[in-house]
Image: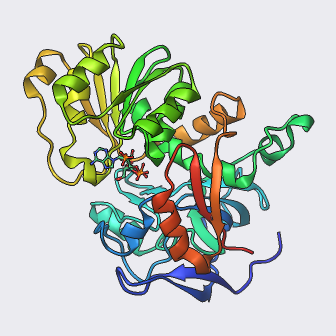
Amino acid sequence: MAPLPETHHALVQRVYAEPLKVEDIPVPKPTAGSAVIKVEVANIISYMRDIYNGVRKYQYPTPLVPGTMCIGRVAALGSDATLLKEGQLAYVDCTIRGRDDPGAIILSGIAEGGTEGSKALMHGEWRDSSYAEYMKAPLENCHPVDEAKFCSPVSEGGLGYNIGQLAWLGIPLVPYGGLKSINLQAGETVVIAPATGGFGGGAVLIALAMGARVIAMGRNADALAKLKKFDSRVETVQMVGDVEKEVAALKKFGRIDAFLDISPSQAQDSTHFKSCILSLRPEGRVSLMGGILGDLPLPHRFIMRFNITLKGKWMYYREDIPALIKLIEHGNLKLDHVKLIGTYPLEEWKEAFDVAADKTGLGEIVLLKPQY
Ligand SMILES: NC(=O)c1ccc[n+]([C@@H]2O[C@H](COP(=O)([O-])OP(=O)(O)OC[C@H]3O[C@@H](n4cnc5c(N)ncnc54)[C@H](OP(=O)(O)O)[C@@H]3O)[C@@H](O)[C@H]2O)c1
């Protein structure tokens, strides 16, 4: 790789909730325990706009280089790197944990977490994220991707994916964390609700890749029909705002082992929480991953009588990432359906955030590409 330049272009937010601006700032230096990554493409999550305009009230310090998971190339390495090589393609995870306290968790560029330790991480060493030409990341957050295997044409023995499609792996990775945390097994039946959004669609696909049968639940009948077409192991149930009707529709599919919720905050009063829990078999498991801000009324008696497990999950564990990369490498999880809706330069962040907020269907992805 060429030596690092002195400065680079980065999106910067100087004041909380104020518009972002492209600035020329110093390129981070590699220090022990870190890699400097040349960002190829960085994901835009559907609700990025509402994070940086303050609507979601996420806590993070300013000035900040925003961002999230990305695909990049290792540009420079700290002296203690043992596996990564300069020039190598890597998936760079946004979940940063305290090395001396894995319970101190931040989402790079997004959220400073809820402990003194996590705040120290975000206000100090790991302040800046991936909406920039270069970023510094902990070594353990950089997961090598076998570029020859993933990106060579199928005719040459590769998988034929492009780098943009690879960036989508950060989407199913989130529900993979939740589904693993409730020990979803091949052959089991899991309800995913809502299944028609970005992470919900990713959840359907990763649950199938894990060998499960999926009941996809959502409000939008057309979006559910698209999911149904995707695989014969997908069944669908529409959310109709009536617990009794929803339970009856779910129970038509027989024994249900697990339920993953990945709701946005707007679904706070949705009936599906109760319907899905009441449809579970005894000893059924629930993964709560949604961004619900208030409290939920729960069917306590049912949960108690039938030994239901409720498990909260923020993101996933580090070891889930190479495991998911293997699922793609071995063809269990295919990326052919991943559709790049748009790839935008940093300057067009506003349009990119708007498009990402609108386009969140199955496998749809919007990216920022800092280097043009
Ligand atoms: N735990 C974690 O680690 C983690 C990580 C990432 C994200 N999340 C959470 O996941 C949530 C979903 O993100 P996303 O990017 O997938 O959002 P998205 O693409 O906007 O999808 C939102 C989904 O929710 C449905 N929905 C919206 N309002 C609803 C309502 N009132 N009742 C029922 N369903 C409703 C939408 O269906 P319609 O088509 O019917 O509107 C759609 O299926 C986020 O809000 C975030 O907080 C959690």
Q: Quadrant of the N terminus?
A: bottom right
Q: Is residue 318 visible?
A: no
Q: Quadrant of residue 363?
A: top right
Q: Give the answer, above or below, for where 88 lies relative to 216.
A: below
Res. 214 visible in picture: yes
Residue 54 image point, x, y percent: 32, 74
Q: Position of residue 140 (x, y in %)?
A: 57, 53
Q: From the image, which quarter does the C terminus lie in?
A: bottom right
Q: Is residue 173 left or right of residue 166?
A: left
Corner quadrant of residue 357: bottom left
- Which residue sits furthest left? 301
Tell me which residue sits at (40%, 36%) in the image.
221
Which residue is outermost to the front? 222
* Residue 340 shown left or right of residue 122 in the figure: right
Judge whether 174 appears above or below 104 on screen: above
In-image side of 328 versus 214 (left or right)? right
109 or 252, nearer to the observer: 252
What residue is rendered at 9% in x and 28% in y?
A: 300
Which residue lies at the image location 83% right of the left edge and 38% below the top edge?
Answer: 158
Viewer-closest of 189 and 16? 189
Q: Position of residue 222 (x, y in %)?
A: 46, 38
Residue 71 position within the rendered picture, expressed as x and y whole percent measured from the top left: 66, 57
At a point 50% along the width and 17% down the height, the residue shown is 186
